[in-house]
Image (cartoon, rainbow, N blue to C red):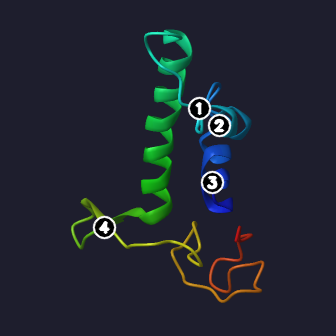
Amino acid sequence: MTDREKEIIKQLNHTIYTVEFMEEWLNRNDNVLINAPSALQSMGAKGYYEAVKQMAKELVVEEKDERHIPKKLIIGNFENLCPHCSHTWQDGNSVCDICGQLLIP
């Protein structure tokens, strides 16, 4: 898992699917006929991880048009994108120049 994927998992704050849980169960290859509970647990972790990978690729931002009706925009990979105001930032910054929020690289 990448650091960004681990950060997303931490931010999701799921009671079961923690970073530690994911690291333990993602690489297992249990046979459902021999050890069904473990195979199903691993399958669940792999499905959750697929969703996390998609979140790491794209960010959906909700904006409002001129009539104040929400619309969703996919703005692509959000590395170096402030999660608060969507301003792009340069490596090395720890605070967004636009909104002043702390940035998580």
Residue behind mark 2 = 13
Foreground mark, 4 or 2, reads 2
The amino acid marked with disc number 1 is Arg
- Residue 82 location (% of width, % of height): 59, 73
Q: Are marks 4 and 3 in contact (CB under 8 Å)?
A: no
92, 99: nearer the viewer: 92
Q: Circle 1: is it few (<14), some (14-19), or many (20+) Cα within 10 Å?
A: some
Q: Are marks 1 and 3 in contact (CB under 8 Å)?
A: no
The amino acid marked with disc number 2 is Asn
- At 53% from the left edge and 30% from the top edge, which residue is drawn? 29
Say what secondary structure mark 4 lies in: strand
CA–CA distance between discs 1 and 3? 14 Å
User: Does label 4 or label 1 sit earlier along the sequence?
Assistant: 1
Residue behind mark 3 = 1
Foreground mark, 4 or 3, reads 3
Residue behind mark 4 = 73
The amino acid marked with disc number 4 is Leu
Q: Circle 2: is it few (<14), some (14-19), or many (20+) Cα within 10 Å?
A: few
* The quadrant where residue 69 appears: bottom left
- At 50% from the left edge and 20% from the top edge, which residue is drawn? 39
Seen in the image, is 65 located left or right of residue 79?
left
- Residue 42 location (% of width, % of height): 53, 27
Say what secondary structure mark 2 lies in: loop
Foreground mark, 3 or 2, reads 3
20, 42: nearer the viewer: 42
